[in-house]
Amino acid sequence: MTKRKLAILGSTGSIGRQALDIVSRHPDRFEVTALSAHNRAEELFDQVRRFRPTMAALTAGEVRLPEDVRFCDWTFGADALEQLAHHAPCDDVLVSVVGMVGLKSVLSARKAGKRVLLANKEALVAGGHLVMEACPDENGSPTLIPVDSEHSAIYQCLQAAKGNPFVHIILTASGGPFRTWPAEQIANAGIKDALKHPNWVMGQKITIDSASMFNKGLEMIEAKWLFHARPEQIQVLVHPQSIVHSMVAFLDGAVLAQMGVPDMRAPIAYALAYPDRISNGSAALRLHQLGTLTFEAPDETRFPALRLAREAMQAQGAAGCVFNAANEVAVDAFLQGRIAFGAIAHAVEGTLSRAGSLPANTLDEVLDADRQARGITLNLIS
Ligand code: MG
């Protein structure tokens, strides 16, 4: 079998490490040709020694390289990801970095004709139209495959649709650690409480976003772009067990769901090996051991992120970008102990009302809206 050559941007993060775990299970299928990390140099060096890529990058800046990793071509600094996405000798680029740098990486990978496996939220949330424009199907094959578990689930369900349009997309949400908490208690929740996710083990920012449900808000906006959905076609359903990863409803009343144990290796492996299904280390789903799956309507009063995401989806221009930027700044302030948990949504709402109608037709406009929104949120917070 011809090996697919893979570049992983963000290889020391949670998604990147799990992707490498899958690659190491299938050495006949995948070859890693490029790896990047931000500042976890030692871990990246270990990965480089193990997977022998031809290119590697550290985006935090230049460091002294140990003798035994100098065989590959190194790039340092903020522009390293775009360089890697463009020049790495690969078929696929797994974009699993956090932040707006993901958008530039996607566009750069596509300019070089590479397929994008997308695990970065900002690219679609902030620059959805730019990404979708850059990622048309080529000869019936996708050039963009989502990695996020919900979007992977919807993507998988749509494979069975044979072109039939969906009526609704139903994004499931675990509800996070505050699912049953009263509004007042959520507003004053501490950092430790917010970092306790019931089902998924993930990075710090996304875990906070799950507690506030801003993560689901970001995913609603992503789904709008990825699946060409109208805002009213996107529903959220709280499902505390995280077994049904999302669903798609059709005109005949049929609802297709994709299920599995909550293990990111499954959607990562699906994207890596598409359209094949390969083993990935995730455990088998044993429904009889679970017995019951439950579902609840989301509470948009206790979790205003969902309402704000809907408003951002309906607005034109940079609203998605502003939603994301404001949330990122506010989460950062929360993690530094500077604002209360409940203030995150207030900061996003305030920023949306001030900057939500900025234009976002070009990459420069998107990046400019992002900068302006961050400034406004910082002001609102202090
Ligand atoms: Mg998700």
Image: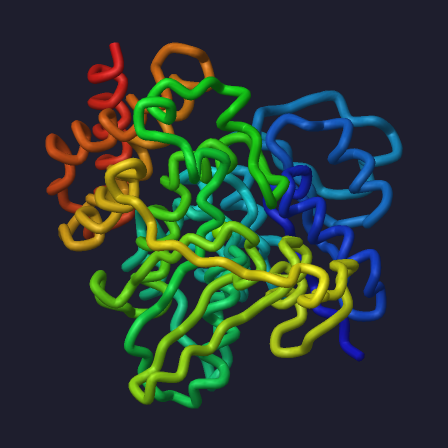
Q: Position of residue 309 (x, y in %)?
A: 26, 46
Q: Position of residue 195 (x, y in %)?
A: 54, 28
Where is residue 49, by image quadrant? top right
Placement of 259 over or under 80, stated as above or below = below
On-image quarter of the N terminus: bottom right
Q: Residue at x 19, y 29 (%)?
A: 351
Residue in front for this viewpoint, 109 or 308? 308
Q: Position of residue 304 (x, y in %)?
A: 26, 38
Placement of 141 over or under 183, stated as above or below = below
Q: Residue at x 79, y 34 (%)?
A: 45
Residue in front for this viewpoint, 343 or 270? 343
Q: Is residue 198 visible?
A: yes
Q: Residue at x 38, y 41 (%)?
A: 213
Where is residue 305, by image quadrant? top left
In the figure, is residue 321 to the left or right of 1? left
Q: Residue at x 78, y 59 (%)?
A: 281
Outermost residue toward the front in this view: 291
Residue in front for this viewpoint, 265 or 275? 265
In the figure, is residue 223 to the left or right of 47? left
Residue in front for this viewpoint, 61 or 314? 314
Q: Is residue 320 visible?
A: no
